[in-house]
Image (cartoon, coloured by chain):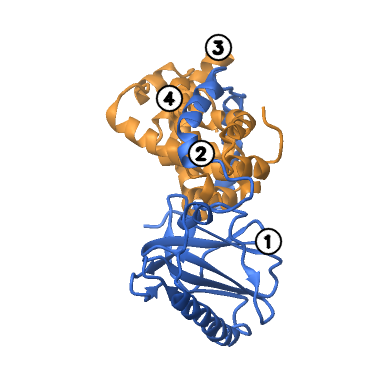
Amino acid sequence: MKAGSDSELIDAVLAGDVDAFSGLVLRYQDTCVRFAVRMLGSRVDADDVLQSAFMRAFRNLRSCREPERFGGWLYQIVINECKTYATRQRRRDLRFTPATTAIERAVAPGTEPEKASDVGDQIESALAMLPAEQREAFLLKHVEELTYDEMSAMTGVSVPALKMRVKRACDGLRDMLEGVYHG
Amino acid sequence: MVESYDESQQDNDARFAARIAAPLRAAEHVHPSFERRLMEKVRAEGPSLYPAIASDGASWWKRKRVLRVSPIAGLALAAGIGAIVVVSSIAIGSRISSRPAVASATPVAAHQDTVQLVRFVFVDRSAASVELVGDFNEWARGTTALQRSGAPGVWAVSVPLSPGRHEYAFIINGSRWVADPLAVKSTDDFGTESSVIRVASTGNSTT
């Protein structure tokens, strides 16, 4: 792995040492993958989208305005790539678990709680049923734990609109998961 | 109808979301082959995107093009530069008090081989260094530095450009990207603003 600050690695790439990009890949690949997996509901799709996002970053490295903030810039690209992919995916296939199934699989009040992994699967299935923009807002706020201002900077969406998306995401998840979690 | 989202609802949702999000926060890792597969593509495309810069740091137009100037044209060129420097300094100077940073790009001389010398002027009293990047130097930092020029805070450089549309921006103090505030803007997919100059073959250019 190439050592050095983000800015130094970018300078090296722009000067023709393209292997220096591997330092940036190794530094940020795991930072981005959680969001991509949760957003797309598939590790295979997340891998495809991250490959595409990193290549997009590589091809546009000259327009990285603040090299010392490469991580944030890359994350913005990942978010956009995931959103585009998720929207396209939603239209074209039905691989996500239908909402009714997610509800049926949820634990009814008063019954034995399911194993943690099953509950996690139900949450992921319910999450996958949300519209892409609500899923994105929920993940950025409550899983990636960004502030609304940070989310707005990343997505270009206003803070009030993001709050409303998070609210609707919570409403939708609550409806689908009421058997798993009350509240 | 406008939906409201008051603080108690937000608190309620936050408690609910905290429980839902807990399993989703588990770490994920890319496939072990991720970096290798990516770097294969990077190495395939890289050399054409980012050719190695010569060790003397010269930008592509210095290395690959020769600006041929006849003796008469050379005199005209020198006279043109001097005149433009003066004109630019006066014009820019009047703006210094009202704007922290201004810039301009002005064609100063044309050559019959269609390459034109365009003078880029940037004014910022707080700048310690100013660079010019654009499609004409492959957006390469560290290749086209503006020099202090006369009045305090005035930076300038002249660059030979071929006729046509060019995009450019300034980099202040080695890190801050600034589009020319006086020129037409161009925005890429990531929201990064650059400026546009159109160089005509006759010597008249517009921004």
Q: Quadrant of the C terminus of chain B?
A: bottom left
The image position of residue B149, as x and y in percent, is: 65, 76
Q: Quadrant of residue B205?
A: bottom left
Query: What is the distance, in whole Å, between disc 1 and disc 2 at their CAs?
Result: 24 Å
Disc 4 target residue: A45
Secondary structure found at label 1: loop
Q: Earlier in the sequence, mark 2 or mark 4?
A: 4
Disc 2 target residue: A58
Query: Would residue A179 be visible to someone looking at this image?
Result: no
The image position of residue B26, as x and y in percent, is: 61, 24
- CB within 8 Å, label 1 to label 3: no
Instruction: Establish if B164 lies above or below A168.
Output: below
Between label 2 and label 4, give the one nearer the viewer.
2
Q: Disc 4 residue type?
A: Asp
Q: Which chain is orange?
A: A
Q: Earlier in the sequence, mark 3 or mark 4?
A: 4
| Residue for point 50% across, 40% down | A57
Work out whether residue A39 or residue B134 is closer to the camera in this orientation and state it. B134
Work out whether residue A112 or residue B43 is closer to the camera in this orientation and state it. B43
Q: Earlier in the sequence, mark 3 or mark 2?
A: 2
Disc 3 target residue: A112
Question: On the picture, is A81 further left or further right than A7?
Answer: left
Specify the colour of chain B: blue
Query: What is the distance, in whole Å, between disc 3 and disc 4 at their CAs?
Result: 34 Å
Query: Which numbered marker is on residue B173?
Result: 1
Q: For mark 1, name the chain.
A: B
Q: 10 Å neighbourhood of mark 4: few (<14), some, or many (≥20)? A: some
